[in-house]
Image (cartoon, helix red, strand yellow):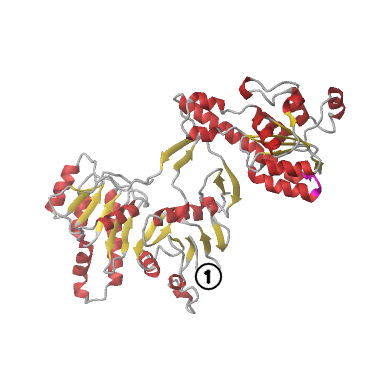
Amino acid sequence: MIRIKRALLSVSDKTGIVELARTLHAYGCELISTGGTRVALVEAGLPVTEISTVTGNPEAFGGRMKTISFAVESAILFDRERDRDEADRLGIRPIDMVVCNLYPFERVARERADTERLVENIDIGGPTMIRAAAKNFRWVTVVTRTDDYGPVREELERTGGSIGPDTRARLMRTAFQHTADYDAAIATTMAERFGEHTFRLAFDGGRELRYGENWHQVARMYRQRGAERSLGDLEVLHGGELSFNNIIDMHSAITAVRELGEHGCAVIKHNNPCGLSRAANQRRCLELAWNGDPVSAFGSVVAFNRPVARETVSFLDLDHEDRGRRKFVDLMVAPGYEPAALELLVRAKNMRVIRLDPAAVGDGLDIRVLGGACLVQDADTRLLDKLELATRTAPQVDDRELVEFGLVAVKHVRSNAIVVVRRLDDGALQLLGMGAGQPNRVQSTRLALERCRENLIDEYTGPSEELEEHIRRALGTTVLVSDAFFPFPDSIERCASDGVRTVVQPGGSIRDKEVVARCDELNVAMLFTGTRHFKH
């Protein structure tokens, strides 16, 4: 335990500094301070030693020179055991605590200040003191965050004016992160001002994951430092450890479902929505999403954009006496759960139940680190630029809301992506079939339409001789959406042969005219959006 006998306080953000100083003073600590901090403490009635009496020099150059001196840095840095005699000979009295936060460079940069103002907000003495105190944390306490004032005050009061080694070590780590972030902000901002591009991010709070993409791979998840909203804020309410794949699939699930109004549900398997729906009733929503591909839904990640009700969970038959009726969900994520819903969910011991609001996870940037290089792009937040009829044939389905639902679905499916969506009689919207990750678009189209056909067969209850006509009529009321242009008419020919009459794509191919002409020949309407949604 180190008793705090002398403390140097020099802060840009004055929040809470008077209260901390009062606590230090109450335990006999001498307060040393500078500039505006000293004024605030004096106005609060606290005795303060001006920094110039320690340095032997006045503040100079408009405040650019205040704390940088042999006397101050020595008082912070010297080893209290090894260097004691030398410090005595030099007349150096130890400083036991440094409380410092830095000039608000990042805030000024966000305000688009001119370069001169930016330069004046580059702190020099502050980082020097912080780094010196952090380096000598065995003897010195360094406090850089106002959030730490409360715990430090509590420890001082509990110990009668001392700070223990665990606290000093924790505050040291925080201090080095603080100066690293500060220097990174200056480096990237000044580079940008002079026409260069650098990119730096910091992540901490690493948590071990169950494993990586495969069992033999070690994996961790970190939270971006300073982010207001993060996937790292997830709360595990029930179930085992999360794996790398759980996190990837959960992110895909919540980004898909948060764009849906009313009640939205996404069923994700291997990073693709095999089920997606929007409905006025949450249980209905889950049923439609699940039935989009009930085979793939086994062991899936299921996400909701509203708190989960007990009635919704009952669809899964988690406590059914016939185990074959129980639907296996690997992970469920939602903004919250009714107590009765959670009571049912915890009966599934192998299910992970996560509380995380999809709306609270920002888009941010899409960042990929590949082989010593870093790719950075804006998130895909644009849905469409236009909705323009390209054919003479009018659309059989004139439903902009359904088209936009299809665009939400397709932008979350891996390329080459094809989705088929429909509106049910009760107004609910459903992903009826999708094709993903194929090396050519016609293959994705075939897979999407085959999935639609299987679903329509499963739900059909009429005479067998009328089944094919039923499928054609049903597909005629759907909208097929492609994430990118059709380079050839072959996919359109497959759509027409199966009964699809409304196709949406971004356009942009040199063969657009040829594809549009073939649509008109086959009585298929085609609409251009002007926006591509590749997802590799």
In this orientation, does residue 249 appear?
A: no
Name the kind of residue labelled 1 in the image: Pro
Q: Residue at the location (35% across, 62% down)?
A: 277
| Residue 174 occupies quadrant | top right
Magenta part of the chain: 159-164
The answer to whether 291 is drawn above or below residue 187 in the figure is below
**For this rendering, which residue is in front, 309 or 498?**
309
**For this rendering, which residue is in front, 366 or 185?**
185
- Look at mark 1 in the image and give the residue it sits on: 339
Q: Residue at the location (83% across, 26% down)?
A: 87
Where does the N terminus fall, quadrant-wise?
top right
Q: Give the image location of residue 312, x and y in percent.
A: 43, 70
| Residue 161 occupies quadrant | top right
The answer to whether 30 is drawn above or below residue 323 in the figure is above
Q: Give the image location of residue 199, x and y in percent.
A: 49, 33
Q: Residue at the location (54% across, 30% down)?
A: 186
**For this rendering, which residue is in front, 263 or 415?**
263
Residue 518 left/right relative to 255: left
The answer to whether 462 is drawn above or below residue 366 in the figure is below
- Answer whether residue 535 is magenta in the image: no
Q: Residue at the location (26% across, 51% down)?
A: 442
Residue 240 left/right relative to 303: right
Mark 1: few/some/many CA within 10 Å (<14, 14-19, 20+): few
The answer to whether 459 is drawn above or below residue 97 in the figure is below
| Residue 278 occupies quadrant | bottom left
Circle 1 — which element?
helix
Residue 167 left/right relative to 93: left
Q: Give the image location of residue 478, x and y in percent.
A: 24, 60
